[in-house]
Structures are given as structure tokens and as C-alpha cells.
Amino acid sequence: MTIFPEVETNNHSGWATIDLETLADAGLISGATGPINLNGLYRTAEQSSHEQFTSAFLPIANVEKGKSKGTFYLSPRISATESGTPVVVGDYQLKVSTIDGCQIYGEGKWKSKAKNSATEGKGVSTVCINWVWLSPTDGTFFSQATVTGSAAAAD
């Protein structure tokens, strides 16, 4: 999942509040099992977060503590820049910190309800986020997420 942040930290405390982050998978979901076929769907999310960074320079910053919450969408991919109507919609909350190998490590819960989604379920999610340079002057955060849980197909 690629994250496109616009972050400014408070240089005195290191805290940053991000009102809206847009996240998008770099690829399609694969290896999913469950009551409906999620393989081949495209995951996007919108979240807000409040995190304390060790530095205002994001390529070397780690998150000491914080939290994120948002809504995720699993949709068919229509084109390289467009997704279709979401099949699954759910919410999540993460507690964030740093562990070896992850500048930002998040751990938390997700849930989806049948009124908004083809499934109703809940589970846990972990995410490991690191800064990657795309050119000598530009970069972004890339993350790897693991999502587990149980769900039932909606009627």
C-alpha cells in the first residue's frame, strides 16, 4: 500500500496530526480466503492520525507513539487510476509505534458491517511502514499490511 502524506511535525514536541491521508494498494489482493472472493480487488483507505515522530525529516523519522483510524474499501479495479463500486467497506483503528524494521508499526482491529458491505466481520491488522526514496529528491512511505479475521457473506 502506498501512502501519500503531507506531514508537518511540531518541532518542539514531534507530534503531527494528519486530518486526511489517502492510501492505495500498489497491487491487487491475492491469497485471500473466505465467504466471498476478494482476490483481484483493489484496496484503498482514508484515515486520520495523530503520531509523535522522532524527527521532522520524514525519511529518517520513527514514530514513538500514536494512533490512526480510518475506513477501508475493497473494490474492483476499472483502470490504472480508477476503482469501481466498493464490495467491502469497513473501519479500522491502529495503535502506532516503531519496531525493528518498521519506521511506523501499527497494530489494531478492523470491522465491516453488512449494511455497507458484502461481508460482515472483524479481525486484526498489522502494518509496517518505511520511507522509500523514489528519486534523489522525492520519496514516499510504503507499507506492508497483514489482515486476518473472520467474516460472513451478507444476505
Image (cartoon, helix red, strand yellow):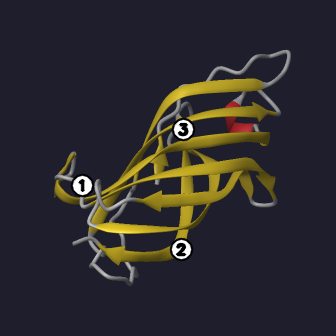
Question: Residue 31, how many percent across, how many down?
Answer: 40, 82
**Please, what is the three-letter code of the amino acid marked with disc 2?**
Thr
**Relative vertical location of residue 115 with respect to residue 140 in this rendering, above or below:** below
Question: Pointer 3: residues within 10 angstroms few (<14), some, or many (20+)?
Answer: some
Labels in figure, total: 3
**Secondary structure under badge 2?**
strand
Determine whether 83 is above or below 14 in the image: below
Q: Position of residue 144 (x, y in %)?
A: 56, 61
**Amino acid marked by disc 1:** Pro
Q: Mark 3 against mark 1, which lies toward the viewer?
A: 1
Pick the front one: 4 or 92: 92
Residue at horizontal 72 percent and vertical 47 percent from the top? 96
Name which of mark 3 and mark 1 comes first in the sequence. 1
- Graded by Cα atoms within 10 Å as few (under 14), some (14 to 19) or many (20 or more), the crowding at tag 1 reads some
Disc 3 on helix, strand or loop?
A: strand
Circles 3 and 1, Cβ within 8 Å, touching? The answer is no
Amino acid bearing label 3 = Gly
Residue 112 position by quadrant: bottom left
Which residue is at a point 64% across and 20% down the rendered structure image?
Answer: 8
Give the class, few, some or many, for how many residues have Cα within 10 Å of label 2's Cα (few <14, many ≥20). few
**Residue 65 appears at what percent x and percent y?**
79, 41
Q: Residue at x 26, y 66 (%)?
A: 118
Q: Is 33 positioned to the left or the right of 47 in the image?
A: left
Looking at the rendered structure, the secondary structure element under dot 1 is loop
Q: Nearer the viewer, residue 111 or 136?
A: 111
Residue 126 screen position, x and y as percent: 63, 62
Horizontal arrangement in the rendering, residue 40 relative to residue 72 (left or right): left
Q: Residue at coordinates 37% horizontally, 83% vertically from top-left?
A: 34
- The residue tagged 1 is 86
**Mark-to-mark CA distance, 3 and 2:** 29 Å
On residue 148, which mark appears? Answer: 2
| Mark 3 lies on residue | 139
